Image: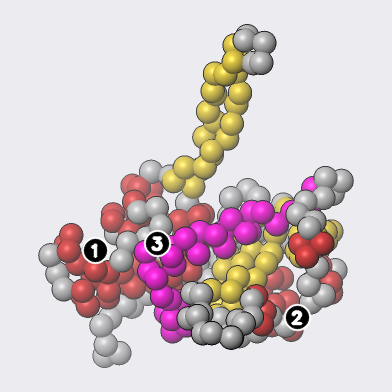
Amino acid sequence: MFLVLTSSKGISSVVTSRILGVNQKTAWKLRHAIREMMDDRQGTAGRLSGVVEVDEAFVGGKPKFRHGVKNKRGRGTGKSIALVAAARNGQARAVLIPNAQRRTMKPIIEGWIDPTSALITDKNPNYVKIGASFASHHTIQHNKRQYANTKTGAHINTVEAVNAVVQRALIGVYHRLGRKHLQRYLDEMIWRWNHRTTESKVRKRKSSSGLPSTEATTVWKPIPVVEQMRGLLCAAVGRQMRRTSS
């Protein structure tokens, strides 16, 4: 559990087995047991509130190159679809969905997000009626090179940062995430995202005139591993994790 909680992108079962001195299958089983404890799809952490961004993530590697074949991107692919929501206060949710249709996403989004929140999405028409359930709904349109609206404060950079974490773990650690176990990997990455806290840093700089000046920035850092361990062990109660069904 310490190895999992202190890794920035995750740790593979091969490396875990090497550190612990067990075989790879044992390490794989241990990792999935820990990911099962990271599951918060029942909403015990509460609903997202404030300004909440929603987007879909298409999880999967780049298709193998074939001469003369142009692979589709985004919604045109056969990749696994994850619905991701991220509040700007640092909390996020993610779940695998069979399709990106409104009837599939609407009950999930309404269950995740407080109705008094401001919803921000892209221009996907499926979000129009979903947005009517919230206090306000703002959109941006990436295919027209609109990435932020200064008047409304609308952007989906936060939820895209969550999606980027998933992609970095896929590229750097796991390499391939099959549909069967993908939800558990998402639970691990969302746990890591949700267990952070802000920290202010003051940096000393020199202005163009040569006079010293200070600049305050806010950075996100993981909460102490002991606190994460307490939360993880509390989540183990009632999970009934066993090697076999009996």
Q: Is residue 165 magenta?
A: yes
What's the residue at 24%, 63% (across, down)?
15
Dot 3, how many residues are within 10 Å of its Cα: few (below 14), some (14-19), or many (20+)?
few
Q: CA distance from mark 1 to mark 3?
A: 13 Å
Q: Quadrant of residue 231?
A: bottom left
What's the residue at 47%, 60% (across, down)?
168
Residue 102's label in the rendered image is 2
* Left or right of residue 196: residue 2: left
Q: Quadrant of residue 84?
A: bottom right
Task: Say if residue 163 shows up in the picture.
Answer: yes
Q: Position of residue 33 (x, y in %)?
A: 32, 72
Earlier sequence position, callout 1 versus callout 3: 1
Q: Which residue is mark 1?
A: 15
Q: Main secondary structure of the magenta part?
A: helix
Assign a secondary structure to mark 3. Answer: helix
Q: Position of residue 127 (x, y in %)?
A: 79, 72
Q: CA distance from mark 2 to mark 3?
A: 33 Å
Earlier sequence position, callout 1 versus callout 2: 1
Name the quarter where the C terminus is drawn. Answer: bottom left
- In magenta, the rendered stretch is 153-182
Name the residue furthest front.
67
**125 vs 228: above or below:** below
Q: Which residue is mark 3?
A: 172
Q: Is residue 186 magenta?
A: no
Assign a secondary structure to mark 2. Answer: helix
